[in-house]
Amino acid sequence: MICLGIEGTAHSIGVGIIQERKGTCQVLSNKIKTYQPEKGGIHPREAANHHAAKIAGLIHESVRVTTIDFSDIDLISFSQGPGLGPCLRTAATAARALALTIEKPLIGVNHCVAHLEIGRGTVRECTDPVLLYVSGANTQVIAFAEKKYRVFGETLDIGIGNCLDKFGRALGLEFPCGPKIEQLAAKGSQYLPLPYSIKGMDIAFSGLLTASENYVKKGKNLEDVCFSMQETTFAMLTEVTERAMAHTEKQEVLLGGGVASNKRLREMVQTMALNRGAKFFVPTRDLCIDNGAMIAWLGLLMYQSGCRMSIDNSLINQRFRTDMVEVTWRD
Amino acid sequence: MTKKILYRGAEAEILLSTYMGRTVVEKRRVQKAYRIKEIDRQLIASRTREEAKLMAESRRIGVSVPLIYDVDLFNGIITMEYLAGDRVKDILNILGKQKRKRICQKIGESIARLHNHDIIHGDITTSNMILFYDRLYFIDFGLGCKTIEIETKAVDLHVLMEAFESTHSQYSSCFNNVLDGYKKNYRGDPVRVLHTIDDIIRRGRYR
Ligand SMILES: Nc1ncnc2c1ncn2[C@@H]1O[C@H](COP(=O)(O)OP(=O)(O)O)[C@@H](O)[C@H]1O
Ligand SMILES: [Mg+2]
């Protein structure tokens, strides 16, 4: 079975085509275009306009680079939520139009669950992980428990990516700021104390963000501030992930989201896993960031396990919670 | 006596040991290789100190906690009374309906008592409660603090709500029973705390 998935929850729009073979996911193509705001953060409507302008070309390109034809596609899926309303609507509209045109079924999927399922589908030995999902807006620890994907921990204020970007913008770095901060941090060595904020399995970043900005204002070495910021935020993330693993008694950890590219974060989570005797997994970068292939894969899993969705029921849901998903494809 | 490991958690090991002829539990916070020494040392010492302080204070205000025998900040060890009971997590789902309801109310009453004295437990889950001789004990105050903030009290309860959703999801009335007990005992305005929980639920999931 072959599925084409459209992802449009935030600042990027993606189209991916995947094929199921013996329960694993083969990515045939995975194209992503990212909206770069001129200045400041994401403006949802401008991002949606960007997506609307790119989507038709992306769909054609994603088919063209494979050996398949539109008639080979069996299913269309799209990111139903959570995310920014205008962006979600653009992706959903494109998906509906495509499904009607090629006369194939349509299915909407949960974006966060897709980040986890693409790991299970494409990474060997990854079967029942705790997912540390770290992107711009989202920071969550998700795992399967009692028949559903549940959020065990999450940020109580801003996402880790937004935290890094806000800090970077204050320094005048180019968006996205994460990679630049990573480079600076690698050269830092002196740790400057920052608030370490964990409540149960939830975390908060805003106090630490303010304190970091204050260090910069006071003229502290930039590399040291970046180093301290990464060490503190990533230690918090690794700690809540470990707590969720202990709580759910799971032996695997999976990284997902754009910040999963950060080498220091990978190293920390991997060290934690190793010391617990657990396995550590990261999908390839194009499957970590927001992408159409993961949407396609989850759509296919849902469809094959009997889920059906009519066009009338394909409305987007900006606040689509992870634990609202009826998990029919695994037990 | 060789120390037997009772439990290996995310941040600490619980060892069964003896102290002046008594059977005791040693809670040892372990060093984490993933974080730098500066953060590791500071966290271990401050959490050990904070935990011992909050346990002592909870006992004073009438919330049951294990008796503390010794605190070693440098090595991150608290030596305390061994409670040979059952974790609430392990027994809640198998209890009869009435007993379950009573325990949940008792949980709420105890949390209210802590909050009346501005004690935030910081990690209220059913793994951190032990039923021993029919008495409800709280353990694991390592993420706790003291504050008058309504927000923090609401977050404290929200942690428990999430624990109930994930671990005791078939008993959706449990958390309501907790809130009933809380409302009964909380001396501030419980409705404000409950409203703040609603805010957190709304905020936490997708802005
Ligand atoms: N005083 C005690 N008596 C009996 N068992 C205990 C005691 N303290 C801890 N335990 C057991 O060890 C487990 C972990 O202890 P806890 O203090 O909660 O550490 P952690 O921070 O790792 O969760 C508890 O869930 C409980 O089963
Ligand atoms: Mg505990």
Image: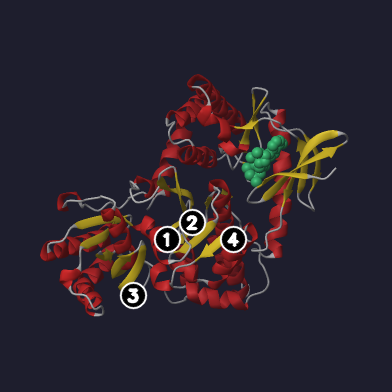
Residue holding disc 3:
A38
- Of A149 and A228, which appears nearest the observer? A149
> Going by the image, does A203 lie left or right of A7?
right
| Disc 2 residue type (three-letter) | Pro
How many other residues sit within 10 Å of disc 2, few (<14), some (14-19) or many (≥20)? many
Residue A100 vs B174, above or below: the answer is: below
- Pick whichever of labels 2 and 1 is earlier in the sequence: 1
Residue A273 is labelled as 4
**Residue contact at pointers 2 and 3, CB within 8 angstroms:** no
Q: CA distance from mark 2 to mark 3?
A: 38 Å
Q: Secondary structure at mark 2?
A: loop
Asked whether mark 2 and ligand 1 are closer than 8 Å, the reply comes as no
- Pick whichever of labels 4 and 3 is earlier in the sequence: 3
- Pick whichever of labels 2 and 3 is earlier in the sequence: 3
Residue at 65 percent across and 60 percent down: it is: A275
Residue at 21 percent across and 72 percent down: it is: A59
Chain bearing mark 3: A
> Going by the image, does B149 lie left or right of A116?
right
| Disc 4 residue type (three-letter) | Ala
Residue holding disc 2:
A129
Residue at 59 percent across and 60 percent down: it is: A273
Q: Do discs 2 and 4 share a chain? A: yes
Residue at 71 percent across and 54 percent down: it is: B30
Chain bearing mark 4: A
